[in-house]
Image: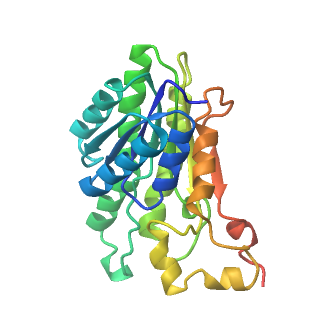
Amino acid sequence: MLEGLVVAVLGASGGLAEASLHALAERGAHLVLMGRRREVLEERARQVRERWGRAVQVVVGDIQDADTWDRVWTAGTALPGRPFGWVCLVGDPGRLPPDDWSVSNLARLFAVNAAAPLLALRDWAYRMKTAGYEGNAVLFASMQAVYPMEGNLPYALGKAALVHGARILAKELGTPPPVRVNVIAPGVTEAGMALASIARGKYRPYVERGVIPRYGRPEDVARAVVFLMAPDLYMTGQVLLLDGGLTLRRDLR
């Protein structure tokens, strides 16, 4: 379904990204992997090339740096096919004690969790439209962006803004050639930043009480990414909540 198309994955060195990279490559996509850990990116690129025979470019950089946005676009145009997809898994969990909830600390987290991803997406999308390409973009938020969970203000603040910003961009970018923008909001997933919370037992009572049957898996996220990358996708400006029903059933005893 993605043969001849290029998908850029930002935050590709994170734990949540690996399954999605393989799912996209399995369906024919060539990939740009952007992140801050070169060794991890190079190893994941090697695995994708060897397993799926796809072309892969690696970009080491920080999403807050506009030069990184330019290098991601340039890397994508150097691959076979044409740019089509953009996926951003970048985020900072913001695990700060309340005594550290300063304006400067919250501003730093907001930059990583909202401002930089939204501006990077807008930059990519207008390059797409200038080139005459339509495409799909996926931003990653969190269940905490759509449900008020006490004690999570530093992280949830940015991710809630990300969701609203994605809707604004989806509206702005819908004129032909359209760039469709959607959001995935994972719950407790056994990869990436959620592993620390799982290890502390923070969410164990929800499994024990049957609120959710299990924790999420990277493969659950990968299926959602593939769905939202469909070239004939008929949705934009939406949030796909992947939390196993936790926020829906959290109050059950």
- Say whether residue 11 is visible: no
* Rendering quarter of residue 248: bottom right
Residue 163 falls left or right of residue 76: right
Q: With respect to residue 183, does 70 lie above or below?
A: above
Count numbered badges in the picture: 0
Q: With respect to residue 86, does 43 lie above or below?
A: below
Residue 90 image point, x, y percent: 39, 53
- Say whether residue 63 is visible: yes
Q: Residue at x 57, y 72 (%)?
A: 149
Quarter containing the N terminus? top right
Q: Residue at x 78, y 79 (%)?
A: 252
* Rendering quarter of residue 66: top left
Residue 130 falls left or right of residue 166: left
Of 247 and 25, nearer the camera is 25
**Furthest residue toward front:** 50
Residue 194 falls left or right of residue 188: left
Q: Residue at x 52, y 21 (%)?
A: 134
Q: Residue at x 78, y 85 (%)?
A: 253
Residue 119 image point, x, y percent: 36, 39
**Tell me, what colour scheme is on the image?**
rainbow
Of 19 and 248, nearer the camera is 19
Residue 224 image point, x, y percent: 62, 48
Residue 166 image point, x, y percent: 51, 41
Q: With respect to residue 104, does 174 lie above or below?
A: above
Of 179 and 82, nearer the camera is 82
Q: With respect to residue 69, does 110 lie above or below?
A: below
